[in-house]
Image (cartoon, rainbow, N blue to C red):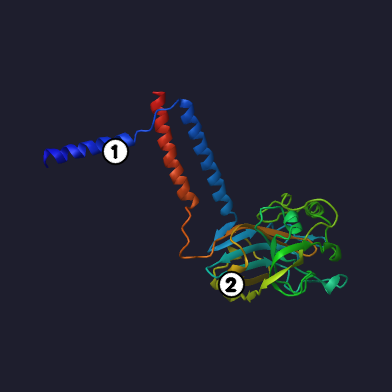
Amino acid sequence: MNTLTRQSLLDFSKKKSETLILPRAKPSFWRSLLGTALASLCFISATARAAQAGTLHNGWNYAIDSLSDGVTGGVIGTNGAFEFYGLALHENRDRIFIAINANLPLTGYDAPDVTNGSIAYGDLFFNFSGHSFPIASQNSELFAIRFAGVNDAGVKDMGVYRHVSAKNVTQINSGFSNLQEYSDYVRLYGGIPSMADLAIDDPYFAQAGSWNILNDIASGDWVGDITFLNHTELSLLGLDFGYFNPTGSQTIGFSFDKGLLPSGDFIAHLLAECANDGMALQGQLAQPLVDDVKTVPEPSGMMGMILFGLGLVASQWLKVES
């Protein structure tokens, strides 16, 4: 190597090292920067936890309910028709799959004195709005699936709906007036009331008041069909409620086109029409796969970048302190 080349490399190395030296600053500056980075790390960590809400097993997101909060007359728990065990969701590139495990048949519970002669499942609501359920209903921000054709919904066809508002049907189904009344009754008889992924007293739902449990579709725009799935089809998809608890006598499954729901964080829930049990599922639906969409860093990758930055800030702070 000739002298000119060696000297050029030395000059380049010197300039490069100079560009990597961060300007000296007061200790208060580095403390402030370090605090900001830590706050960002905490926010991203919390966001990641929210996106992973629920219990994952075999590609399904499960919400497992209390086994002692279904009310069937004076019977509380698994010996009654209204005990709900779990709600699960699975998605692939094209479709969303829903499974419900409970003791209540799809045809409902025979009750000659109520509307339609039976007390059935309410509708399955999806809320992506970030608002509480009553507010989202008031604003018609909900999505919902009517899968029980014998219920008292304000829409006729089964399937997926958007721009949904919800209504109370407990009053015409010998049910509870509000969730506080339901939870007090369950506790009185030794049960443990729950909404699976949500606490029974979660402010997401209205708790007190008169006939304010909203459990059926009042109105909405139909956007697509659902396809029912049998036990074999659900098993081939990896569904396994038995992994968590003893299971109910009924497993109801259906699927629909993934494009009928938006992507992002959601709360889904359903209640019996009498509100004798219910369960909620928290989760996140992935965005449709599009080849030309740029990849957004995952929370874990973003946390790695922040940790690297924290190390750099800390090293500079120590230099200043020394």
Q: Position of residue 71 (x, y in %)?
A: 78, 60
Query: Closer to the camera, 99 or 255?
Result: 255
Q: Position of residue 14 (x, y in %)?
A: 25, 35
Q: Which mark is residue 234?
A: 2
Q: Earlier in the sequence, mark 2 or mark 1?
A: 1
What number of labels is visible?
2
**33 relative to 269, above or below:** above
Query: Closer to the camera, 148 or 235?
Result: 148
Q: Is residue 232 left or right of residue 125?
A: left
Q: Is residue 1 left or right of residue 153?
A: left
Residue found at the far right of this picture: 113
Tell me what residue is drawn at x 43 percent, y 27 percent.
25
Q: Hey, what amino acid is under mark 2? A: Leu
| Secondary structure under the numbered disc 2 in the rendered image | helix
**27 relative to 68, above or below:** above
Numbered disc in front, either 2 or 1: 1
Q: Quadrant of the C terminus?
A: top left
Q: Hey, what amino acid is under mark 1? A: Lys
